[in-house]
Image (cartoon, rainbow, N blue to C red):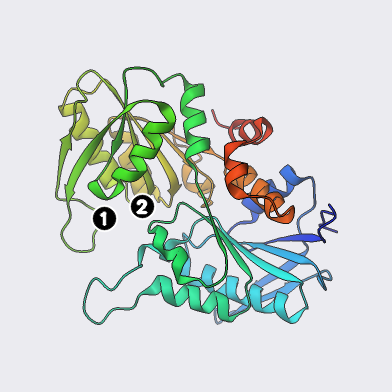
C-alpha cells in the first residue's frame, strides 16, 4: 500500500503513463511504494485507466507530465482525476511536472483558442482539488485555476549543480535568450551573485527558429550560463551560443527547467558551441538523451516529493524553498555526471 501516515491523513501516489520514472523517484524519496494501477490503449486509440487498490478517503496524487504526447497525456490525466473522484478519494492533486499547454496563455491571433484556460477548466471540472507544476512558461496560467496551484522552481536545483560544477565565480554571466526571459535570468543571477546579459531575438511565424539574435551586455572573456524554461528544437539556444562566442565569450553553458527534445535537437546541441546543457527529468527523454555527451539530467522528483510532504503537513511552500534539505539536493544530483 502506497501511504504516508503523519497525522494528517493517508497519501497515495499514482503515476500516469508519461511520468512513471518520475513518480517512482518521488516514491523513493518519500520511502513509499508506487500506487498499483492499469493504463490501456485500445486498438482504436481510446484510453482506459483503473486504480488497482482502494483509495476511499485517501489523499491521492497523480503524476503526469503534458509534454511529448500532450493530447494523449492530458486526456489520460483527466480520466485519472475522474476515476479517483468516482472512487471516493478524500482529495485529488494533479502533479504536472511539465504543463506544455501553458505556452498557450492568451489570444494573440484572431479566432484562436486559449488552450491553457481550456485545460485548466477541464482539469477542475473533472474534480481536482489542487495542482502542482514547475516553471510554467506563462506564470499567469496559475490564475486560470480557481483551485490552489503550487508553482515550483527548478532554479535551486540548477544553481546548486552549477556550484558543484565549479563554474560560479566572478567570470560567470547569466544570459537570458530573449527579453521575455529577463526576469528569470535576473532571479538566477541573484541566487548566484553574478551579472546578467540578454539575447534579443526576432521570430516570424510559428517555427522554433528565431530569425536574429543580438547580445545585450558584456560577455567578452566571460563564462556564460544561458537560462530558459524549456527547449524543443534547440534553435534559440544554439543561436544564442553562437552569438555569445562571436562576442568573445569564453564558454557557454545552458540550464533549462524542461527539455522536450528529439534526435534532431540533440544533434544540433551536440554540434553547437554549448559546452554542457543541464536540464531536469520533468519530461522522460531517456531514449533520446542516452547517447548525448553534452546533456546532463538533474532530477526534480525529490523537489516534487518534498512539496507533497509540505502540503500534507500543512506547512508553507516558501519555508520549504528557504530550507531545502541537503538530502533533496544530493538525491537530485546524485546520478548526474
Q: Is residue 158 left or right of residue 234?
A: right
Please tell me the numbered disc located at residue 232: 2
Total number of numbered labels?
A: 2
Q: Are marks 2 and 1 in contact (CB under 8 Å)?
A: yes
Residue beneath label 1, please? Answer: 208
Label 2, label 1: how far apart the Cα atoms are: 8 Å
Q: Is residue 66 left or right of residue 205?
A: right
Residue under the image location 47 percent in, 32 percent down? 159
Give coordinates of residue 89: x percent, y percent: 76, 73
The answer to which of 181 and 82 lies nearer the viewer is 181
Give coordinates of residue 247: x percent, y percent: 16, 27
Q: Is residue 146 left or right of residue 206?
A: right
Residue under the image location 75 percent in, 46 percent down? 30
From what the image shows, is residue 293 above or below residue 299?
above
Residue under the image location 66 percent in, 53 percent down? 23
Q: Secondary structure at mark 2?
A: loop
Residue 321 quadrant: top right
- Badge 1: residue crowd in 10 Å (few <14, some 14–19, many ≥20): some
Residue 196 quadrant: top left
Give coordinates of residue 261: x percent, y percent: 40, 50
Q: Secondary structure at mark 1?
A: loop
Residue under the image location 82 percent in, 71 percent down? 57
For marks 2 and 1, the one nearer the N-term is 1
State whether residue 41 appears in this view: no
From what the image shows, is residue 19 above or below residue 90?
above
- Badge 2: residue crowd in 10 Å (few <14, some 14–19, many ≥20): some
State whether residue 220 appears in this view: yes
Amino acid at each position: 500500500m502506497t501511504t504516508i501516515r503523519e497525522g494528517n491523513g493517508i497519501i497515495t501516489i499514482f503515476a500516469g503513463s508519461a511520468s512513471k520514472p518520475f513518480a517512482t523517484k518521488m516514491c523513493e524519496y518519500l520511502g513509499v511504494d508506487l500506487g498499483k494501477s492499469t493504463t490501456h490503449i485500445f486498438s482504436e486509440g481510446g484510453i482506459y485507466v483503473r486504480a488497482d487498490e482502494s483509495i476511499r478517503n485517501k489523499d491521492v496524487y497523480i503524476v503526469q507530465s503534458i509534454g511529448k504526447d500532450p493530447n494523449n497525456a492530458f486526456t489520460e490525466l483527466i480520466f485519472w482525476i475522474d476515476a479517483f473522484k468516482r472512487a471516493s478519494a478524500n482529495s485529488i492533486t494533479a502533479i504536472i511536472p511539465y504543463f506544455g499547454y501553458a505556452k498557450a496563455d492568451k489570444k494573440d491571433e484572431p479566432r484562436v483558442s486559449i488552450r491553457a484556460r481550456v485545460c485548466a477548466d477541464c482539469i477542475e471540472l473533472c474534480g481536482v482539488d489542487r495542482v502542482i507544476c514547475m516553471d510554467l512558461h506563462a506564470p499567469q496560467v496559475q490564475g486560470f485555476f480557481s483551485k490552489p496551484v503550487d508553482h515550483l522552481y527548478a532554479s535551486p536545483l540548477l544553481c546548486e549543480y552549477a556550484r558543484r560544477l565549479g563554474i560560479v565565480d566572478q567570470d560567470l554571466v547569466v544570459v537570458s535568450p530573449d527579453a521575455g526571459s529577463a526576469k528569470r535570468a535576473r532571479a538566477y543571477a541573484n541566487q548566484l551573485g553574478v551579472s546578467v546579459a540578454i539575447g534579443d531575438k526576432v521570430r516570424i511565424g510559428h517555427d522554433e527558429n528565431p530569425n536574429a539574435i543580438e547580445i545585450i551586455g558584456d560577455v567578452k572573456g566571460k563564462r556564460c550560463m544561458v537560462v530558459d524554461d524549456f527547449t524543443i528544437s534547440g534553435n534559440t539556444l544554439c543561436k544564442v551560443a553562437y552569438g555569445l562566442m562571436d562576442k568573445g565569450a569564453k564558454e557557454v553553458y545552458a540550464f533549462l527547467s524542461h527539455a522536450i527534445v528529439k534526435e534532431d535537437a540533440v544533434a544540433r546541441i551536440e554540434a553547437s558551441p554549448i559546452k554542457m546543457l543541464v536540464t531536469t527529468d520533468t519530461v522522460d527523454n531517456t531514449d533520446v538523451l542516452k547517447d548525448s555527451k553534452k546533456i546532463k539530467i538533474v532530477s526534480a522528483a525529490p523537489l516534487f516529493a518534498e512539496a507533497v510532504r509540505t502540503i500534507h503537513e500543512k506547512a508553507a511552500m516558501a519555508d520549504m524553498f528557504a530550507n531545502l534539505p541537503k538530502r533533496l539536493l544530493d538525491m537530485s544530483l546524485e546520478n548526474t555526471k
